[in-house]
Amino acid sequence: MKINNIKHTKHLSPCKISDTICLPDSNVPRIVVIGGGFAGLALVEKLKHKEVQVVLFDKNNFHQFQPLLYQVATSALEPDSIVFPFRKQINGYKNVLFRLAEVEEIQPSSNTIVTNKGIVNYDYLVLATGTTTNFFGMESVEANSLGMKDIRDSLNIRHMMLQNLEQAAITCDEDERDALTNFVIVGGGPAGVEMAGALAEFCKYILPKDYPEYPSSIMNIYLIEAIDKLLSTMSDKASSKTLKYLKDLNVKILFNESVSDYDGSQVTTKSGKTILAKNLIWTAGVKGQFPKGIDEKHVVKGNRIKTDSYLKVEGYKNIFAIGDIASIITDDTPRGHPQVAQTAIQQGKYLGDKLLEIIKNKPIKPFKYKDKGSLATVGKRRAVADLGRFKFAGYFAWLLWSVVHLMSISGFRNRLMVGFNWAVSYFTYEKSNRVIIRNFKPKPPVNHTKK
């Protein structure tokens, strides 16, 4: 039997006429949140089941646990163990919606945002767009190196590393082999230190087994830091211990140095030193990223948005900023709060509570940041901890670092996967994720700095 001309129509809830992205109409205030990082998700969690409509926009459909990106890059973890779908996260939150779109412009005069998929109105707007890698205007470095800000960056680093090690086993040219097996990390903050430690452990424990044809000294790891101290935001004890741990792992550390040029094969520093390397990982700085539409007079150093003590963007009555993008400048915080996860989470939770009070025209208290301490790891049983006046290093610091990070990952399955991988690695140093799933294709070498 043949049936023709039957159409099945699936209906969503009625949409506002002014929206070109379909969203259910609502009689409660609409809060649009741009960015699903630590700050954005903390805000959403606070607003769930409340008398507001929350719409979360992100260019990805997942949240990523950035503190462990370096472990994906060095094959210690698979990418799906540190990412979590937004729709899974908000499952059961009847007042929260997710839309996959990239916000291109904010139009404060009409209370709308323009995305690559359409236009949406808001009653309140929260910017939680985070940061991107800051190459400080060095086009050659930006074109030829890799940052480590999202899961794609980590996978690019992993595939670059594995492909270059394989190519080094093929080439007969000694200079080419040196460049393929030299790794340069720029930036001595937590990301750079942890990446250097992970690569050093790979070199010490994995390379001899997987590449027995290589001499043990073939893989060199350089860490370049512009000042005379690693982990500059932590204590002197943490810095000196970290330096010792890295030296024990044979990491070559260049203090008071900065990169002036990189052509894809050779790193040049400002003092004139050169290093042959086809692997340059840039962790030396970040800058804020947000859609156009915010008046430039409210943008401060680091491309951050200046807010008042209530996280409201100066000059706007219903636009807020939280997380790495926000900068509350006071006598106590002349440079704004630290751009770390705990700041973002605290600001997200604070604003989630205070927005409900703002909507009800209730007085609110200003945001107060509580520093819960800092942790960094250099490898197995090597970590440093600054917890107020308690500062310690070694096994217990590493154990604390592991527990804190494990419990902060979204999803029980993800925590289970990460915990299992760490347990196997602890006893064997084995990293079974050393597979090249897709070829990494570097950009054609570019040199804009040298004339």
Image (tube, grey):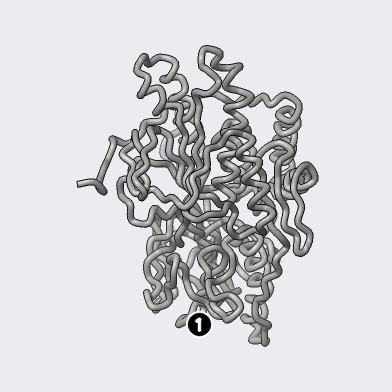
Q: Residue furthest top?
A: 213
- Which residue does the image show at 39% across and 41% down from the upper left? 145
Local secondary structure at mark 1:
loop
Q: Position of residue 350 (x, y in %)?
A: 67, 71
- Which residue does the image show at 37% across and 74% down from the upper left? 296
Is 216 situated left or right of 178 in this image?
Answer: right
Residue in the foreground of this view, choosing between 16 and 168 = 168
Give, as a three-letter code, the residue at label 1: Lys
Q: Do we see residue 180 in this rendering?
A: yes
Q: Do we see residue 14 in this rendering?
A: no
- Which residue does the image show at 56% across and 67% down from the upper left? 322
Residue in the foreground of this view, choosing between 198 and 76 = 198
- Which residue does the image show at 33% across and 45% down from the upper left? 261
Location of residue 64 with respect to 29 vertically, above or below = above
Location of residue 66 with respect to 387 vertically, above or below = above
Q: Position of residue 2 (x, y in %)?
A: 45, 28
Q: Position of residue 199 (x, y in %)?
A: 57, 34
Question: Residue at label 1?
Answer: 317
